[in-house]
Image: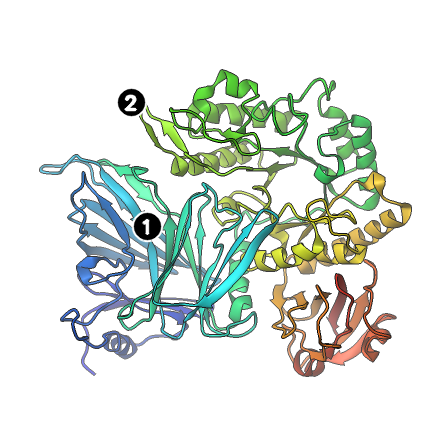
Amino acid sequence: MPRTTARTAHLRAAGVSFVVELSGPLPRILHWGADLGDLTDEDADALSLTADGAVLNSALDTPRQCTVWPTEADGWSGTPAHQGHRGGTATTPRVRLTGAEERPGELVLRLADEVGELDITLTYRLDPSGVLGVVTELTRPATGPGQDPTPYDLTGVTALLPVPHRADEVLDFTGKWCREVSPQRGGLRFGSHVREVRRGRPGADSPYLLTVGVPGFGFRTGEVWGLHVGWSGNQRWVAEQLPEGAGVHGSVLGGGELLAPGEIRLAPGDRYTSPVCHFVWSDAGLDGLADRFHTLLRARPTHPASPRPLTLNTWEAVYFDHRIERLLELADLAAETGVERLVLDDGWFTGRRDDTAGLGDWTVDPTVWPQGLTPLSERVHGHGMQFGLWVEPEMVNPDSDMAREHPEWLLAPSQGLGPSWRHQYVVNVAHQDAWDYLLRSLDHIVTRYSVDYLKWDHNRELHEAVARGADGADRPGVHAQVEAVYRLIDALKARHPGLEIESCASGGARVDLGILARTDRVWASDCNDPLERQAIQRWTGQLLPPELVGTHVGGPHSHTSGRVTAGSFRYLTALFGHAGIEDDLTARTPQELAGLKRWAALYKELRPLLHSGRMVRADLTDDATLLHGVVADDASHAVYCWVRTATSTKAQSGRVQLPGLPTRGRYRVRVRTEAGLPALHQTSGPAWFTAALDGWVPLPGSVLGGAGLPLPTLEPGQALLIEVTAA
């Protein structure tokens, strides 16, 4: 085989290879996917030799290639790596490699666009989890002789990676308030599958994790490639297949920030840094992708290390009825039940008797709280619980002192305000005076009342999000807003190192790895209906491990859906996450409180496993049933939840494999009854089930993970908890 002169960079981790040929004028991506092992020079030459496809009829006169920075200059007719102009000119980038540096787990490429007068740094970091993070930095060099001082208007930057022809099915997500993370999938057709987020936050309909894979991929099987855009503002996602392919690859997967016209204008000396785009590959289906993301997140130095405290949030318990006697009684009952953190939700600050006023005035309402929050904070801390507080710093009601005194702090056009949303508008957090006020107010509240936890909400989308510049002109403000919010959270945490913060946005409308780089959990949905929550939590877990997802037990009658559900179903649904309670304990019977207490003890017993093990989900043929669980890394301990959401024509499940268990192991199995038993749609359960109600039943891995376990037929809206340990 003839020798090539090009140098090859090869990143490897956790069964993943990323191979780039460092040839000129632009490097090209030879492979992203399964580990190729230690590449010899001959192996690298073979990859290079086979990276050229045919020269097609009525096409380029040279083989098409998939470079690290695709543009029309190399014959790419799809989404370009970057777009922009300089006063309506310099619209055809000519990018070339100027330098490359390969470090352990990281490849840094330095490129130059002489037409746009841009220096580009493209960084690929392959994490030990196998997740490939891609960050782009574009710099306009300082003015020199002959340089055009006209700002370069950057209109788009997209990180693009190739995927093979066999990846011809696409999965992403949509949703709405109280029904977040709803999957949608279909064939990857020719053209562009594009999702654009223009809400100023990821939104309840976030694409969340754009995945392509081999036909029929499932939770446990199939080769899949995925992308998550780690950014809390506007986004653009694309899976694109052109008839001519992408070099020898079939299509590309890409994403980045969606920029408004004029939002990023690079004058000489200016710089733009893209969000991290997280690319992930697995040959073990969607659970394989999830496992890589969970490993990535758990390895962060900022990942919560202490046991996730059982939380009671007061919203559905009292709403705006902040009578101190009622809240003190609630705190006492919470402590008796086993709650470890109590969070006072919306309604504690000045003028906040409903959602039409007060937002923005971050001082305690003296008419409702004449002694401040001290009586409640001291009672909560006196019980050994943490004290949390709801805030929404990025929003303001027109009926507030803040809005009346500082209309210039609103993120809105000078022509006037558009329609309100939940009676509120957006604060321009990038306005330095507003930023200072928010930090000062939050710092005072956290310090004054020894606040351990903030539920940080974000209840409206950013429409007409423009800020008035020094020249009096309105300019797009979403990018600056997101960066300012990040800085605000970082500054507050720097002042209060032990403070934990939850990302809430009308439920799960801001769930992304950008906000989670500085927060400690997310509120997946305002809906606590366990039937809805089974689906929401199932798919939120595609990106986030259970300990980062708030999962609360609501009352028997759901406040958002109106559905009445069994206590055991509510308990077991909330168990698989950072568990809590969203209910008025003063309205519960002694029997109900006793049930909650048993469930709280069960959560504390199992959370070391739930918050460290591998999430598993079974591929079942009956859509009315779900089987999910968590398995310890060494497979010595597991818990599974068997769920029925509706009736089905099948009278019984037959044998169902418990995912994640090796077939050669020896195990014992029992049914956990602390949360209550489900109602059965049969006269009696399978023999093993009846025996497991009374204690451990020995069963080998060849049955549990191999042949399968016949599971009982439950009534709709019921769940069963099964525990497995090594014998």
Q: Relative to 26, is 400 on the left or the right? A: right
- Position of the N terminus by quadrant: bottom left
Mark 2 burial class by Cα count in 10 Å: few <14, some 14-19, many 20+: few
Give coordinates of residue 488: x percent, y percent.
49, 33
Name which residue lies at 44% across and 36% down.
463
| Circle 2 residue | 471
Q: Quadrant of residue 259?
A: top left
The reply to whether callout 1 and callout 2 are in contact (CB within 8 Å) is no
**Mark with earlier residue (1, 2):** 1
Name which residue lies at 78% across and 27% down.
323
Which of these two is toward me, 624 or 525?
624
- What amino acid is at disc 1? Thr
Q: In this figure, what is the number of numbered marks?
A: 2
Give coordinates of residue 159: x percent, y percent.
34, 55
For marks 1 and 2, give the CA distance.
30 Å
Q: Which mark is residue 136?
A: 1
Q: Residue furthest top?
A: 405
Which of these two is toward me, 194 or 385?
194
**Which circle, 1 or 2, is nearer the viewer?**
2
- What amino acid is at disc 2? Asp
Which of these two is toward me, 523 or 399?
399
Q: Relative to 503, is 694 on the left or the right? A: right
Label 1 secondary element: strand
Give coordinates of residue 381: x percent, y percent.
75, 34
Q: Relative to 481, is 677 on the left or the right? A: right
Mark 1 burial class by Cα count in 10 Å: few <14, some 14-19, many 20+: many
